């Protein structure tokens, strides 16, 4: 065994036997690199097709060659990232499961961008107006229910920060995708989710303080 | 869904939610625990909570789980 192969083995000796072989063979200096890379790319491409089909509901109008191109691009980009991070594989899962994660994240990102470019949120979906019909007051509602809804409306309007209100209205009230909203606001999923979480917690606290608590044991602290 | 249940869902914010970023590096481990028929919430409680609430992360999780189930553990040679 050459010095180079010894280094390769040392830097990749993590995980189960099959995973270790993947990592070793995906290094550019391995004699089976081309074959292993081609086999991985093939399964990534099939996984990308499958994942795109699974999310087809978010991709109206995407079909035929354009659909194929997106799948190909997802597989290519995932492959590049896997090869660039292969030494970071820690063997805590099977290598292929680790690799599927990359291609699913690529599909997720590209689907969100496609949806945002073709169907960005409307101003109405981002602006506080009123509660949806499913939550608004109806004739015959008990007084307690009416007061709860009024307290919620008041809290949305007066207690949330502008960003919390915008995020809560878009995602919780108008079903805007969190990733589409992230792109619209130039942010990221984690930051938007934090805005949403804080808004929900604040609204729960406001309702509880007004004497109209929602939920029981698992509700957020106030 | 009752109005009260709808309101509870609308305002769902559970303590211990790990957020989106925490799930990214461990998503493959989380999925493999599920594939073994075990409960990932014991090892990753914050992400288990998060996946019940965040539709974006839930979709990613479901995609990785389905890919692992459908395409399996290939060998490189």
Image (spheres, grey):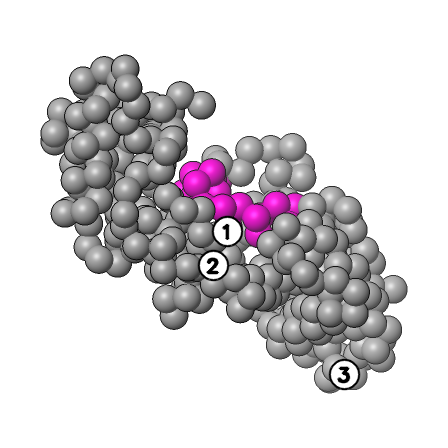
Q: Quadrant of the C terminus of chain A?
A: top left
Horizontal arrangement in the rendering, residue A78 relative to residue A200 (left or right): right
Q: Residue at x 57, y 52 (%)?
A: B60
Q: Nearer the viewer, residue A13 or B71?
A: B71
Asked if the residue at tag 2 contacts the one at tag 1, i.e. Cβ–Cβ closer than 8 Å, the answer is yes
Residue A188, position as x, y percentages in the image: 41, 64
Residues in magenta?
A: B43-65
Residues marked 1 and 2, same chain: no
The residue identified by callout 1 is: B56
> What is the distance, in whole Å, between disc 3 and disc 2 at their CAs?
39 Å
Seen from the viewer's position, the closer of residues A183 and B13 is A183
Query: Which residue is label 2 attached to?
Result: A179
Query: Which chain letter goes with mark 3?
Result: A
Image location of residue A116, percent across then percent down = 51, 64
Q: Residue at x 56, y 66 (%)?
A: A118
Secondary structure state at the residue bearing disc 1: helix
């Amino acid at each position: 065994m050459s010095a180079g192969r010894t280094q390769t083995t040392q830097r990749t000796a993590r995980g189960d036997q099959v995973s270790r072989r993947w990592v070793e063979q995906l290094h550019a200096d391995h004699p089976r690199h081309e074959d292993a890379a081609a086999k991985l790319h093939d399964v990534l491409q099939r996984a990308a097709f499958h994942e795109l089909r699974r999310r087809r509901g978010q991709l109206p109008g995407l079909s035929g060659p354009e659909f194929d191109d997106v799948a190909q691009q997802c597989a290519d980009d995932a492959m590049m990232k896997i090869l660039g991070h292969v030494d970071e594989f820690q063997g805590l899962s099977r290598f292929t499961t680790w690799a599927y994660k990359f291609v699913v994240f690529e599909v997720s990102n590209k689907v969100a961008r496609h949806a945002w470019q073709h169907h960005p949120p409307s101003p109405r979906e981002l602006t506080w107006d009123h509660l949806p019909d499913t939550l608004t007051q109806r004739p015959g509602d008990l007084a307690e229910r009416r007061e709860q809804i009024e307290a919620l409306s008041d809290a949305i309007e007066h207690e949330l920060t502008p960003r919390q209100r915008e995020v809560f209205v878009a995602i919780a009230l108008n079903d805007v995708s969190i990733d589409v909203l992230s792109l619209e606001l130039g942010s990221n999923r984690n930051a938007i989710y934090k805005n949403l979480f804080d808004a929900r917690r604040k609204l729960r606290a406001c309702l509880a303080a007004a004497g109209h608590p929602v939920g029981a044991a698992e509700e957020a602290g106030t | 869904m009752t109005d009260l249940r709808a309101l509870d869902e609308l305002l769902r914010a559970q303590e211990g939610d790990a957020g989106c970023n925490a799930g990214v590096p461990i998503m493959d481990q989380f999925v493999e625990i599920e594939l073994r028929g075990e409960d990932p919430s014991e090892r990753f409680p914050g992400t288990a909570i998060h996946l019940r609430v965040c539709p974006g992360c839930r979709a990613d999780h479901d995609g990785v789980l389905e890919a692992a189930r459908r395409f399996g553990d290939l060998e490189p040679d």
